[in-house]
Structures are given as structure tokens and as C-alpha cells.
Image (cartoon, rainbow, N blue to C red):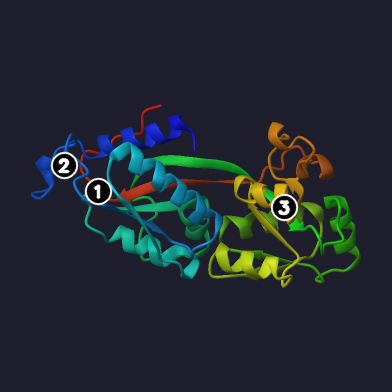
Amino acid sequence: MTTSRTSIARRAILAMFAGASLAVPLAVSAQDYPTRPIKMIVPFPPGGATDVVSRRMALAMEKELGQTIIVENRGGAGAIIGAEMVSKAEPDGYTILSTTAGVHVVNPAIYPKLPYDPMKSFEPISQFVATPLALVVINKTSPFKTVQELIDYAKKNPGKLSYGTAGSGSSLHQNGEMFKHAAGVDILHVPYKGAGPAVTDFRGGRVDMMWSYVGSVLPSVKSGEYRMLAIGSSKRLPLIADTPTVAEVLGQPGYDADTWTGLVAPAGTPGHHRAPE
């Protein structure tokens, strides 16, 4: 977590509640906010990439704001349960949602009757993670040393390989299907109720591969538990320069698989302003 992103999030949160004392009877001024713990809802089960980065962000925010950030996991229904909870919360600055591209971009496209409006039910605070996705396998048990080997096997054995995700409609599912289409392969999608359960089965050998945040899998790659076959960014990353991009392997420069995580508050939260650059 960089200091600049943390500071942006802090300034954005304080700016959002600058007019709170005029609009909410029990609210206090921005100079006093926050006067009690803030609840951060993560709409996924514990252990997944979103949960991990959200908890890191919460720790950074605690230092900046001088107040406790309580991270509460409300997983289920493709993150709809947690998102709906925040959309209906009191817009006083003490309940916020750690959201993703899957929640605000993918879900509206596949669920026509959401119990909230992804645009009108929330006020944006700040994005704090933007990352390419990585395709990983278990180092000791997977026979695939390169993504091309995996693609070649999948073409000869359609439907034999599987990949796990945080659930249908998640950004991991979206990018997994994009990879299948781009590579021309048939790989079974296994949805879970969050990335945490998916990771558990991945480590147990019940699914053959996963897409995940580069940052969240890097420690497991360095320890030798995972093998990173490729990343979804358009260019190689300096930190893992030996790992090819899917774009270069497939010869498709336009291929770009990434995702983001950010914070939003319930609509009607007073004093909203955009996060300063």
C-alpha cells in the first residue's frame, strides 16, 4: 500500500463528510470525523484477494484516521448481499463498501434485477488497487511449466482442466472466460462463494488453476508453492520480468486482463467530492 494512495483515500473520506454537520443531525464536522469505528464491508468470504487487500487498506486507514476500521465479511450471491447491505446503510460515513470491478461492472451486466442501482445507490470514495491478474498453478503438482503447454493440453483435452473463481460474474470469472475465448480452449469454470474457498480447493488440487491478483499470489510464487504461468497485463511487469503476458504468448496485443478494488459509501452521504489527484 503506497503512502500516496492511502493519503488520497484519507483526504477523499474527509472531504466526503465535510458538510455532514449541516445535513445529518447526529453527524459531526469533517475536522472531528471519525469519532467512532468505521465498518468496512467486504462482500466476499475471508481469505480471498479482495479480503486481503481490504484488510491492508483498513490498517493503513486506521493509522491515517486515528480510528478503528472494522472489516466485516458479508459474502454470498456474487457479492450482492454485501453490496445491498451498504446501499441501505445510514449514509453517515460509518459504513463503507470495499468493492470491485466485478461488483460494479460485471454484476449489472448479468443480473438485470439487482436490489440496488450500482451507480445511483453509492458514492465513490477512492480506488486503492488496480492490478493485472496472474494465471497460477500449483508448483509441485502441475505438469505445466508454461502457459503454452497448458493451452496445448487444453486443446487436445477439452473440458479436462478446471479453474476456480470467487463466483459466477466475478472479475476472475470474466477474465477466465476471456482467456478461454482468446486461446480457443475449453476449460471448466468452477465457481465458489468467494475467492477464499476457491484458493482452499486450488491448494488441495481440486481445481487445476486460478486467476488472481498479482500482488496476492506473489508471496506464494516466491515461496515456491505457486507457479505463475502468465499475467494479463499488456506489458511485462518489472518485478516479475521473466513472466510473459498472455498477449505476447497468444500474439494478441489487445489482450488485457486486470481488475480494481475501491471504496464506496451509501448514496446520500453528505459533502461528497471526488478524490483529489
Residues packed near mark 1 inside 10 Å, few (<14), some (14 to 19) or many (20 plus) = many
Of 67 and 251, the residue lying toward us: 67
The amino acid beneath tag 2 is Ala
Q: Is residue 141 left or right of residue 91?
A: right
Kind of element beneath mark 2 = helix
x and y percentages locating residue 213 in the rendered image: 61, 49
Q: Is 108 rendered above or below residue 197?
A: above
Residues packed near mark 3 inside 10 Å, few (<14), some (14 to 19) or many (20 plus) = many
Residue 135: image tag: 3
x and y percentages locating residue 19 in the rendered image: 16, 37
Q: Furthest-top residue in view?
A: 277
* N-term-proximal mark, 2 vs 1: 2
Q: Looking at the image, which residue is at 62% across and 60% down?
A: 173
> Residues at badges 2 and 1 in contact (C-beta under 8 Å)?
yes
Q: Quadrant of residue 211?
A: bottom right
Q: CA distance from mark 2 to mark 3?
A: 44 Å
Q: Looking at the image, which residue is at 55% across and 54% down?
A: 49
Q: CA distance from mark 2 to mark 1?
A: 9 Å
Residue 93: image tag: 1
Kind of element beneath mark 3 = strand
Q: Is residue 228 left or right of residue 211?
A: right
The amino acid beneath tag 3 is Leu
Residue 20: image tag: 2
x and y percentages locating residue 25 in the rendered image: 8, 49
